[in-house]
C-alpha cells in the first residue's frame, strides 16, 4: 500500500467522522494480514484493543494514515508493546550511518522510521501501557538518534565533497555538536516538536584552504538539517525546528561557531539566549567539546553575567495559546531562579522540577501535585492533537477536530476538556505569580492596615522572637541608656543589625535576655556597645554564645566581675587543655560550711568560660571536651571530700574505707550525659557506708541544674538496684566473676578510681577493677553476648533521626563500645591501656602492634568527632532538626565543631564516620577480617 508522504495526498479539509472508523478498522486488519503473513486473530480482537483502534481511525487523521501505511508496526505495538518497534527502528537507523545524498534523501530515509516510531509510541500511550513520562522519554531518545544521524549524514557529505577539511576522516565530527533547549532538552517533547536546537562548531577544528569557508558551509548544513526534518512545502514534517539565534527563515540561526555564540551570550541584551543556554544540553555530535562549551557557558550564565531581573519579569509575563505554556513558565522560573545553586533543576523535565521543588520547599506539596496533574493533561492534549494533525500545532478550532480531541483525551465533550485545561492553566498561572512575587506579597496582607510603617514589635516577632511588644520596650530602654554617651535615639544606631543577628541564632529570646542582663550587670562601668558595634571583633562570638549556648554562659552575666570575660583579649593566654583550665582556675578547698556551694559556683563559672571560648573560637571544641571532662572528674572527687568532711562521725569513719570509681565506657562526661559511678568498701560498713553514699549522691544532684546538672547512676553493682550501694571487696569480686553481664564487663574494663578514703582502699579498688580483665570469661563468648545485647538495644531503642548520635549505628555509643572492647581484650597483657585516656590507649596499642595505626587513627578521630557534636548539642540543649530546625548561626557552630565549612556538609561526615565505626565494630567485636585482609586473601 503506497504511503501518503504529502499533505496533499489527503486533503486537510477532510472532516473527521467517527462513523468511518469501523470500515477503516476492517481495511487495517486486512493490511495487517498482508504485512505479517496472516491475521494475528484473537490478540487483536480484545475489546479494549478494538476500541483503541476505532478511536484511532475515528478521531485522528495523520495517525490513522500511518497505521494504514505501517500496519505491522501498529499490530506489534498492540500485541507486544512499543519496545520491539523502537528497537527495530534504532537498528535500521544505525544502518544509515553511511548514507549519502542531500536533505531530500535524508528526509526520505528518516521518514519511514519516524512514522513507525510515532505509531508505536502513540498506541502505547493511548492504550495506557506507557505513562506520559515514558512515552515522552522514548520520543526524546529517538529524536536524539535522528539528530545525530542527520548531523553525521550532512557533515560527512560536506567532508566528502572537499568543502570541509578534517584531520581524521573517521572522526569528522570533532568540534561539532548540537545543543538542544526547551522541551527537547527537558524531555517534555511532543510527537512533532518543535525541536529547539543549534549546531555549533569549533573553527579551529577545520584547517586547510577551506577553513575560511567553514562558516558558509555550516550555515548551509543548518538549513539542510531544517529542510530534512521539516520537509518541503506540502509534506508532513518529521519535526518542526526552532533556534534561539534568529528567525530560522532560510535556515538562518541553526548553525554558528562556538566563539560567536560565547561573544553574543557575554554581550548586552543577551538574556534570552542566556536563559536558553542555561538550561540546554548536548544531544548529538562531539559531546566532549559540547560539555566543555556548556561548562564555559555555565560560568557566563550563572556567575559572571547573571540574567537581569527585568528579563525574568518579561519571561514570567509571557502569554501564548499553548495549553502547556503556564506550566513551562513555572518550570522555567524554577530553572532560572534555582539552577545556579542546584544544577539538577537546569535540564529536568517539568514534572521532575515540580516534585523536586516540593521536596526542597520551594513549592508547597499540594501546589506541586496540582501542577504535575495539570501539566500532564496539557501535554496529553497537545500530543494527541499533533497525532491527529501530523504537525507541530498546539491549538484546534474546527468543530470536528475539537470533538475528536475530546475523544482522544477521554472526554465526552470538548467543552469539558476545555474547562479542565483552562482550570489547570489558571492554577498554574496563579502559582507562577505567587512564586515570582515570593512570600512578601502575602506577608504584607497581615500587616497593620492603620500604619504603613511596620512596628518594632512586629519586626522582632518576624525575626523569631516571642512577645514582640515587651522586647520592643526593652530595646527602647537600651537605646535610652546609650543615648547620652553615643548619641542617636534608635538602637540600630548603636548596634546595627544586632537584633537580626540574634534572630539567626538557635534561641533568639535567650540571646535577647542575656544581653539585657549584661547591660544591667555592668551598668556604667563598661560600654557594652563596643562589643556589638559595627565591625567589633567580639560581636559574632558574643551573639553565638548568647543565642546558642545561652544556658551555659548565663553565669557570666550575673555580676560585673564575671562580665569582664567579655572584655578580655583572647590569644595565647587562653587555656587550650583541661589541665591549663584547672591550673588557671583552681577549685576551692573542699572544706568549710560553704564548700559545696563554692565548688558549684566555681564549676559554673569555669564551664561558662569554656562554653564562651568554644562559641567565639578562642578555645577549640576538642580542648573544650577535654576541659569539661577534667572539670567533671575533679568535681566528683572534691564532692567526695566535701561529703566526707561534712558527714557525721560514723559516716566519716565509714568513708575512710570507701573508694569511688567512675565508668568511662559511655564517653566523655559532657553536659546532659549521665555519670556512671560506683563504690567499693574495704569491708562491709553497714548502714554508715550506705548513708555516706546516699549523702554523696544527694550532694552531686544539688550541685547544679540544667546544663550544669550532674546525673549520677550507681546501678551497676552487685544485685543491681536491690543490692547495697557500697559493696565490699569480696562482694565486688564475686560480682565481677559471675554476675556482671557482658555490657557491665566492658564498663568495668574502663573503670577508674578517682577518690578514696586512703591510699590502701584506692589500690585495693584498682586491683578489684583489674580483676574484671584478669578473671573474665572467654573474650569470644563475651563479645558474642555483647553483640546480641547491642542488637536487642538497637531494635528496642531505634534512632529517632540521623542526629540521635547515641542510638545511631556507628555513632557515639558504638565507637565507645569498640574502644572499650579493645581495652578489655588487651588490658590483661598490657595493663597500661586501662589507665590511659582512650586516645593514649589506642596510640599505645598501635605502637605495640595490637591494632593497625589506621584503625587507631580512625577510632580516635571518630570518638573526637562524636564528642564534639555531643558537646554542641548539650550546650545548646538541641537534639533534632525535625523538632527544632537549625538556624543559620547555630548551623555554623555545628559545622565548626564537625570540622567542615557548611552545615550541609555535616551529615555526610556523620555517615562517613558511622560507616568507619561500623566496620571497626565488625572487625573488633565480631572478629570479621578487614576489607584489606579479605582482598589480599582473595588475591
Image (tube, helix red, strand yellow):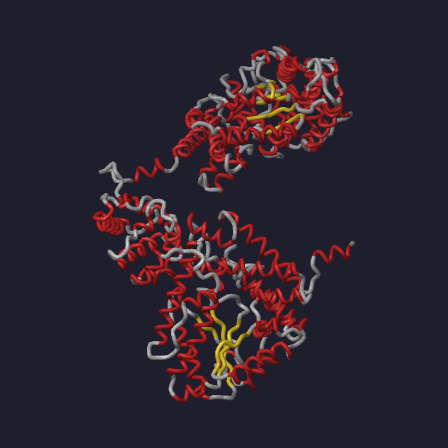
In the image, residue 792 above or below residue 647: above
In the image, residue 635 above or below residue 561: below
Q: Residue at x 49, y 25 (%)?
A: 323
Q: Front-most of 878 and 143?
A: 878
| Left or right relative to 499: residue 137 | right
Q: Residue at x 67, y 22 (%)?
A: 114
Where residue 843 sits, quadrant-wise, is bottom right
Q: Front-most of 839 and 36?
A: 839
The number of numbered discs placed on residues in the rendered structure image is: 0
Estimate the x, y position of residue 405 in percent, counting from the top left.
53, 23
In the image, residue 570 above or below residue 367: below
Residue projecting furthest to the front: 572
Q: Residue at x 46, y 55 (%)?
A: 880
Where residue 459 sits, quadrant-wise, is top left
| Quarter in which the N terminus is drawn | top right
Estimate the x, y position of residue 11 in percent, counting from the top left.
60, 11
Query: Is residue 34 in view from this perspective?
Result: no
Q: Front-most of 148 and 768?
A: 768
Estimate the x, y position of residue 731 in percent, counting from the top left.
55, 85
In the image, residue 529 above or below residue 375: below
Where residue 857 sits, quadrant-wise, is bottom right
Query: Is residue 415 in view from this perspective?
Result: yes
| Left or right relative to 606: residue 203 | right
| Quarter in which the C terminus is drawn | bottom right
Estimate the x, y position of residue 49 in percent, counting from the top left.
64, 30
Amino acid at each position: 500500500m503506497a504511503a501518503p508522504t504529502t499533505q496533499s495526498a489527503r486533503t486537510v479539509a477532510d472532516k473527521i467522522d467517527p462513523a468511518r472508523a469501523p470500515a477503516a478498522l476492517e481495511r487495517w486488519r486486512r493490511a495487517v494480514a498482508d504485512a505479517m503473513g496472516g491475521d494475528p486473530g484473537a490478540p487483536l480482537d480484545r475489546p479494549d484493543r478494538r476500541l483503541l483502534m476505532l478511536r484511532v481511525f475515528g478521531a485522528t487523521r495523520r495517525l490513522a494514515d500511518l497505521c494504514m501505511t505501517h500496519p505491522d508496526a501498529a499490530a506489534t505495538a498492540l500485541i507486544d508493546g512499543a519496545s520491539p518497534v523502537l528497537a527495530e527502528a534504532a537498528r535500521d537507523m544505525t544502518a544509515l550511518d553511511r548514507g549519502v545524498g542531500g536533505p531530500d534523501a535524508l528526509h526520505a530515509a528518516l521518514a519511514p522510521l519516524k512514522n513507525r516510531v510515532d505509531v508505536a509510541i502513540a498506541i502505547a500511550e493511548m492504550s495506557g501501557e506507557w505513562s506520559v513520562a515514558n512515552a515522552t522519554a522514548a520520543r526524546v531518545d529517538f529524536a536524539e538518534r535522528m539528530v545525530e544521524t542527520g548531523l553525521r549524514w550532512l557533515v560527512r557529505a560536506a567532508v566528502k565533497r572537499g568543502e570541509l577539511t578534517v584531520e581524521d576522516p573517521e572522526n569528522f565530527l570533532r568540534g561539532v555538536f548540537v545543543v538542544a533547549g526547551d522541551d527537547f532538552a527537558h524531555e517534555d517533547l511532543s510527537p512533532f516538536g518543535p525541536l529547539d536546537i543549534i549546531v555549533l562548531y569549533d573553527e579551529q577544528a577545520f584547517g586547510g584552504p577551506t577553513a575560511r569557508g567553514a562558516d558558509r558551509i555550516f550555515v548551509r548544513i543548518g538549513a539542510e538539517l531544517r529542510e530534512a526534518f521539516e520537509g518541503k512545502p506540502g509534506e508532513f514534517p518529521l519535526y518542526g525546528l526552532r533556534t534561539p539565534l534568529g528567525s530560522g527563515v532560510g535556515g538562518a540561526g541553526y548553525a554558528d561557531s562556538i566563539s560567536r555564540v560565547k561573544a553574543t551570550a557575554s554581550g548586552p541584551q543577551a538574556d534570552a539566549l542566556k536563559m536558553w543556554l542555561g538550561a540546554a544540553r548536548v544531544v548529538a555530535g562531539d559531546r566532549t567539546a559540547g560539555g566543555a562549551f556548556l561548562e564555559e557557558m555555565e560560568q557566563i550564565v550563572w556567575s559572571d553575567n547573571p540574567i537581569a531581573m527585568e528579563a525574568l519579569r518579561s519571561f514570567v509575563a509571557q502569554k501564548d495559546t499553548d495549553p502547556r505554556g503556564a506550566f513551562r513558565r513555572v518550570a522555567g522560573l524554577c530553572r532560572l531562579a534555582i539552577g545556579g545553586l542546584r544544577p539538577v533543576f537546569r535540564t529536568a523535565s517539568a514534572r521532575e522540577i515540580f516534585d523536586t521543588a516540593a521536596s526542597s520547599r520551594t513549592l508547597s506539596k499540594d501546589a506541586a501535585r496540582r501542577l504535575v496533574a495539570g501539566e500532564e493533561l496539557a501535554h496529553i492534549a497537545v500530543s494527541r492533537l499533533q497525532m491527529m494533525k501530523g504537525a507541530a500545532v498546539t491549538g484546534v478550532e474546527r468543530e470536528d477536530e475539537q470533538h475528536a480531541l475530546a475523544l482522544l483525551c477521554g472526554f465526552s465533550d470538548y467543552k469539558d476538556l476545555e474547562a479542565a485545561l483552562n482550570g489547570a492553566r489558571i492554577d498554574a498561572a496563579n502559582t507562577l505569580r505567587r512564586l515570582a512575587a515570593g512570600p512578601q506579597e502575602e506577608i504584607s496582607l497581615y500587616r497593620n492596615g492603620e500604619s504603613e510603617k511596620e512596628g518594632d514589635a512586629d519586626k522582632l516577632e518576624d525575626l523569631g522572637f516571642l512577645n514582640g511588644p515587651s522586647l520592643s520596650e526593652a530595646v527602647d530602654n537600651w537605646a535610652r541608656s546609650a543615648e547620652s554617651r553615643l548619641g542617636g535615639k534608635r538602637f540600630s544606631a548603636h548596634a546595627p543589625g544586632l537584633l537580626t543577628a540574634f534572630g539567626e541564632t538557635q534561641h533568639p529570646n535567650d540571646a535577647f535576655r542575656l544581653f539585657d542582663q549584661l547591660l544591667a550587670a555592668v551598668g556604667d562601668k563598661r560600654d557594652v556597645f563596643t562589643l556589638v558595634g559595627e565591625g567589633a571583633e567580639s560581636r559574632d562570638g558574643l551573639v553565638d554564645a548568647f543565642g546558642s549556648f545561652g544556658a551555659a554562659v548565663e553565669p557570666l552575666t550575673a555580676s560585673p566581675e564575671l562580665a569582664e570575660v567579655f572584655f578580655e583579649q583572647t590569644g595565647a593566654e587562653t587555656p587550650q587543655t583541661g589541665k591549663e583550665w584547672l591550673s588557671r582556675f583552681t577549685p576551692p578547698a573542699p572544706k568549710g560550711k560553704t564548700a559545696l556551694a563554692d565548688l558549684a559556683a566555681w564549676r559554673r563559672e569555669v564551664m561558662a568560660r569554656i562554653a564562651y571560648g568554644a562559641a567565639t573560637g578562642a578555645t577549640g571544641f576538642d580542648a573544650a571536651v577535654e576541659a569539661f571532662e577534667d572539670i567533671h572528674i575533679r568535681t566528683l572527687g572534691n564532692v567526695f571530700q566535701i561529703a566526707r568532711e561534712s558527714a557525721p562521725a560514723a559516716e566519716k569513719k565509714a568513708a575512710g574505707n570507701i573508694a569511688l570509681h567512675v565508668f568511662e565506657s559511655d564517653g566523655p562526661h559532657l553536659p546532659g550525659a549521665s555519670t556512671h559511678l560506683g563504690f567499693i568498701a574495704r569491708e562491709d560498713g553497714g548502714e554508715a557506708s550506705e548513708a555516706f553514699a546516699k549523702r554523696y549522691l544527694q550532694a552531686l544532684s544539688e550541685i547544679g541544674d540544667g546544663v550544669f546538672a550532674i546525673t549520677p547512676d550507681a546501678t551497676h553493682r552487685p544485685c543491681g538496684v536491690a543490692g547495697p550501694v557500697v559493696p565490699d571487696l569480696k562482694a565486688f569480686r564475686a560480682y565481677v566473676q559471675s554476675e556482671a553481664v557482658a555490657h557491665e564487663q566492658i564498663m568495668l574494663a574502663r573503670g577508674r578510681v578517682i577518690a578514696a578514703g586512703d591510699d590502701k582502699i584506692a589500690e585495693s579498688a584498682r586491683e578489684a577493677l583489674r580483676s574484671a580483665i584478669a578473671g573474665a570469661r572467654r573474650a569470644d563468648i563475651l563479645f558474642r553476648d555483647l553483640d546480641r545485647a547491642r542488637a536487642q538495644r538497637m531494635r528496642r531503642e531505634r534512632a529517632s533521626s540521623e542526629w540521635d548520635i547515641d542510638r545511631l549505628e556507628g555513632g557515639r555509643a558504638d565507637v565507645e563500645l569498640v574502644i572499650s572492647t579493645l581495652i578489655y581484650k588487651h588490658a590483661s597483657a598490657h595493663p597500661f591501656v586501662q589507665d590511659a585516656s582512650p586516645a593514649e590507649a589506642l596510640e599505645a596499642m598501635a605502637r605495640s602492634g595490637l591494632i593497625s595505626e589506621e584503625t587507631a587513627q580512625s577510632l580516635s578521630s571518630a570518638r573526637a568527632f562524636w564528642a564534639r557534636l555531643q558537646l554542641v548539642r548539650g550546650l545548646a540543649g538541641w537534639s533534632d532538626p525535625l523538632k527544632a530546625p537549625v538556624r543559620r548561626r547555630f548551623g555554623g557552630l555545628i559545622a565548626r565543631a564537625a570540622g567542615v565549612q557548611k552545615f550541609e556538609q555535616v551529615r555526610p561526615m556523620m555517615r562517613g564516620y558511622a560507616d568507619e565505626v561500623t566496620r571497626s565494630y565488625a572487625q573488633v567485636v565480631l572478629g570479621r577480617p578487614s576489607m584489606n585482609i579479605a582482598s589480599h586473601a582473595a588475591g
